[in-house]
Amino acid sequence: MMNLFRPKLIDTLKGYTPAQFYKDVVAGIIVGVVALPLAIAFAIASGVSPEKGIFTAIIAGVIISALGGSKVQIGGPTGAFIVVVYGIVQQFGVSGLVIATFIAGIILIIMGVAKLGNTIKYIPYPLVIGFTTGIAVIIFSSEVKDFLGLKMGNVPADFISKWIGYSRHLSSLNLYALFIGVFTLLVVLLWPRVTRKVPGSLIAIVISTLLVRYFHLPVETIGSRFGVITAALPHPVMPDVSLETIRQLIRPAFTIALLCSIESLLSAVVADGMTGGNHRSNTELIAQGVANICSSVLGGIPATGAIARTATNIKNGGSTPVAGIIHAIALLLIMLFIGQWAALIPMATLAGILVVVAWNMSELENFIDVFKGSKSDASVLLITFGLTILVDLTVAIEIGIILAAFLFMRKMMQSSSVQQTILSPDQLSDDEFNQSVIPKGVDVFEINGPLFFGAAYKFKDTMKVLEKPARVLIIRMRNVPVIDATGIRVLRDVHQEIKKKGTKLILSEANSEQVTGALKKTRLLFQIGKGNVRDTFEKALKRADEVLSDTDPSKKSYAG
């Protein structure tokens, strides 16, 4: 169990020094300041009240740092969840979001216990880029109303309906809101040239809030839309989970879990590259699961590892999970003492911050590179991207994974081949039986590539071409790395068919550990006969000679 779940905090506290603590405190406070506007912005964009974003950043921040498998991971709400959370809230309400997040937490723990941490990184890259860029487009389109200050009520959830609504209400453009939004964009983008110690988003919030407050600019604020921000953590409430709610919410919950696992492990990998560390992926998944369960119980939203905040932590000297815990404590103190002032923040400011977040998420260069690549990768990219924008993120991930799997199977089928072999001396190695030609009465076929359900029937079709098989059929399997149940079944069918015609089957060089294990675990080895499965081609030819000699006593020994 310790190999499966061992938080990095346990290791890093050994030999922990006051100097490290000082650096972690400084980094934690800076990251807490960075996280505040993002937590509020992500919550509002997700369709929930702003304090829920802060609750999530505090609760998940502590748990992910304390229990996680990365030394420097910072957890909290991220932009990747905006689309799926907004959809859940619109369809099932906040109570549905709580239940979906709770179920997602359980799924994440199961994934960690099942040691799927290393498997998550094999999610196809075009799929990840497709839905990431799609999410960025949706985030941008969702912020147009607040960025322009349009008076149009609730923004439609459907992408096309959003833009139709914007076009119909463009005449209500608020120039003050537009000014605040553009000002925020410029500050966030240009402030890093001044200093990176203080985030540009915080500077933009402070200045724009003061402008709106003291010049009485007619723009919407957090307070005018949501009222006063609650400056206290909520009481825990266990969600009412039933079989019916699980049935309704299992798909979005799975999407939350998959997004969480991908983003948190990607963030941990990036952190490893920056620090030279080595995260524990399964421990990280379990910690993410616990964090999401606790966040849902306390009324929060989904959380995961945040790449930008993790990088900020590292750049400012954070080197242990203590920095992540300090970041959560800093957020808590900010909420308790100055949280009420957050109600004065203009919505246009938050919209400007999220426009920058969307741009950073878009990975436009990577999108173009994948699009210019192979047709199969481009098709997965575009279909996932299109479904994310026009249909639903859950559907996009499901269809994207299925499409990627089918395209992968096609590639494996194309890489697999079955061909008849007529050997000459230069085709045989020294340790094989050196003979100019294969003797009469022996056919040799070689399988190249994995013999799985996609390629197995290609092999069977090739065998059907043999109108009158020889007395002995040798199948070389030296280039077969894996075989599945379908491959075993096809070999069994071929064996039974040629046996009826009086042909003996010999398997040669089935030496892959997986193939050998599969043959032993099934009755195929017994049916073919252990003596007819040989580990070298030389031994297979000698066995063929024995078979021919038994059926034709006048035949000379092939070995002699």
Image (tube, grey):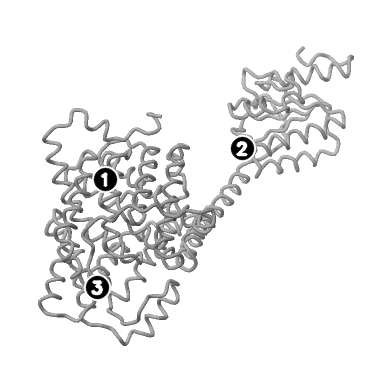
- In the rendering, at what x and y percent does residue 213 appear? 13, 75
- Measured in 3D between alpha carbons, the distance from the residue under mark 3 to the one under mark 1, in whole angstroms, is 30 Å
Tell me the residue at 38%/83% (across/down): 167
Task: Name the amino acid, label 1.
Answer: Val
Instruction: Please give left or right for residue 497 compared with residue 104 in the image.
Output: right
In front: label 2 or label 1: 1
Task: Name the amino acid, label 2.
Answer: Pro
Task: Name the amino acid, label 3.
Answer: Ala
In depth, the one of 292 and 116 nearer the eye is 292
Q: Is residue 378 visible?
A: no
Image height check: is 100 above or below 448? below
Tell me the residue at 39%/67% (across/down): 138
Tell me the residue at 62%/33% (across/down): 480
- The residue indicated by pointer 3 is 348
- In the rendering, at what x and y percent does residue 467 appear? 85, 39
- In the rendering, at what x and y percent does residue 477 appear? 66, 30
In front: label 3 or label 1: 1
Dots 2, 1 in contact, CB < 8 A = no
- The residue indicated by pointer 2 is 450
Q: Earlier in the sequence, mark 2 or mark 1?
A: 1
Dots 3, 1 in contact, CB < 8 A = no
Density class for disc 2 (Cα within 10 Å; few <14, some 14-19, many ≥20) is many
Image height check: is 335 above or below 168? above
- The residue indicated by pointer 1 is 62
Toward the top, the furthest residue is 560
- Measured in 3D between alpha carbons, the distance from the residue under mark 2 to the one under mark 1, in whole angstroms, is 46 Å
Q: Quadrant of the N terminus?
A: top left
Image height check: is 290 above or below 360? above
